[in-house]
Structures are given as structure tokens and as C-alpha cells.
Image (cartoon, rainbow, N blue to C red):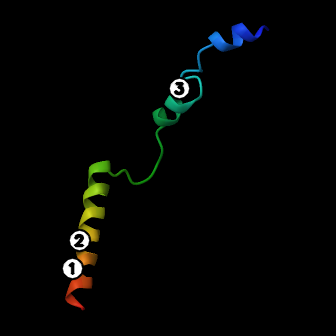
Amino acid sequence: MSSKKKRREAPMPASSAGLLRFFEDETKGVKIKPELVVIGSIILIIISILIRLLTI
């Protein structure tokens, strides 16, 4: 192949790399919405800050 041809080739799309197929598979286990994870982590951070402030 010439070097000009290599430069014009576009990168492979995400579906060819198997990234879309990964999210299509159903797995067993606990399913938690991402919103609950974010809210839970924010609550945990707030509780830890409050405990830190109350023990000083």
C-alpha cells in the first residue's frame, strides 16, 4: 500500500471494535440505575463531611 492510501483511511467505527456488542449482552445480577449510584455517592460524601465536622 502506498502511504497516501493509509492516510486517507478513516478509523474503525465503534461497532466494529465490539463496543456496541458489549452493551447488548444481558447479564445476570443486580441492576442499578446510574442515577441511584450518583445520588448514593453524593449522600455518602455529605454524611462523611458532616461526621468530620461534628467530631472536630
The one of 18 and 7 positioned closer to us in this rendering? 7
**Left or right, residue 10 beside residue 28:** right
Q: Position of residue 15 (x, y in %)?
A: 53, 24
C-alpha separation, residue under disc 3 versus residue under disc 1: 44 Å
Amino acid carrying label 1: it is Leu
Residue at horizontal 58 percent and vertical 23 percent from the top: 16
Does residue 48 lie above or below 43 as drawn? below
Q: CA distance from mark 2 to mark 1?
A: 6 Å
Residue type beneath disc 3: Ala
User: In the rendered view, does 52 fall on the left or right side of 6?
Assistant: left
Determine which of the numbered discs, if any, sits on residue 50 in the image: 1
Please state which of residues 15 and 13 is positioned toward the viewer in this rendering: 13
Q: Amino acid at mark 2?
A: Ile
User: Which residue is disc 3 drawn over?
Assistant: 14
Q: Is residue 35 visible?
A: yes
Foreground residue, 32 or 45? 45
Element assignment for label 1: helix
The image quarter containing residue 10 is top right
Task: Choose mark 3 or mark 1, whichever is in front.
Answer: 1
- Position of residue 43 relative to residue 2, above or below, is below
Q: Which image quarter is the N terminus in?
A: top right
Q: Is residue 44 above or below residue 21?
A: below
- Give me the disc on residue 39: none
Query: Which residue is rendered at x = 59% and y = 28% of the image?
Result: 17
Q: Mark 3 or mark 2: name the one nearer the start of the chain.
A: 3
Q: Are marks 3 and 2 in contact (CB under 8 Å)?
A: no
Circle 2 residue: 46
Instruction: Name the spot of residue 27 as percent of width and height, x first.
Output: 48, 44
